[in-house]
Amino acid sequence: MSDPNEIDRWKSEVWDTLPREEQQRIIDARKQYLRRKRHDEYIAYLNTPQWQLLRRLKIEEAKGRCEVCMGKENLQVHHRTYERLFRESLSDLTVLCDACHELYHANDKVRKITA
Ligand SMILES: [Zn+2]
Ligand SMILES: [Zn+2]
């Protein structure tokens, strides 16, 4: 199988030989790649029967209403937490209409910026 010391060799023989700016450039590119990959995986997940079922159960549980304004139109299911992403329980989710969902996330951003 894999050599447990390979990482140390890779670090000293490859990584450490690169200039500092080059290391930073590579790390930033990888971070961007991983963010995009995770985002793509998430989007793909939203199309699975598993998520569609969970979404339907959550909306049923909320009696087909937005849990903030009680509206019945354009319902979306918001993640309270991504802790159990891909195996969420109903309590990880909240039903929101598109307007409340948008408002919440806009507000969330404001809080983070001003915090
Ligand atoms: Zn609403
Ligand atoms: Zn959300």
Image (spheres, rainbow, N blue to C red):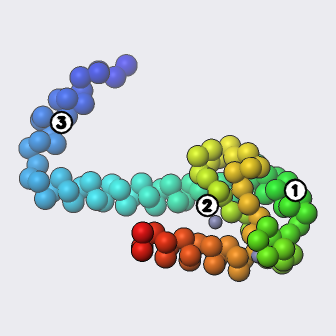
Q: Is residue 26 left or right of residue 57?
A: left
Q: Secondary structure at mark 3?
A: helix
Mark 3 lies on residue: 11
Which amino acid type is shown beneath numbered disc 2?
Ile
Q: Position of residue 108 (x, y in %)?
A: 54, 71
Q: Earlier in the sequence, mark 3 or mark 2?
A: 3
Q: Earlier in the sequence, mark 3 or mark 1?
A: 3
The local crowd at label 2, few if under 14, some if 14 to 19, many if 20 or more residues have their Cα within 10 Å, is few
Which amino acid type is shown beneath numbered disc 3?
Lys
The local crowd at label 3, few if under 14, some if 14 to 19, many if 20 or more residues have their Cα within 10 Å, is few
Q: Which mark is residue 46?
A: none
* Disc 1/disc 2 C-alpha distance (Å): 24 Å
Mark 1–mark 2 CB contact (< 8 Å): no
Q: Is residue 4 left or right of residue 45?
A: left
* Disc 3/disc 1 C-alpha distance (Å): 52 Å
Q: Is mark 1 within 8 Å of ligand 1?
A: no
Mark 2 lies on residue: 43
Which amino acid type is shown beneath numbered disc 1?
Glu
Mark 1 lies on residue: 61
Q: Secondary structure at mark 1?
A: helix
- Place residue 97 in its image quadrant: bottom right
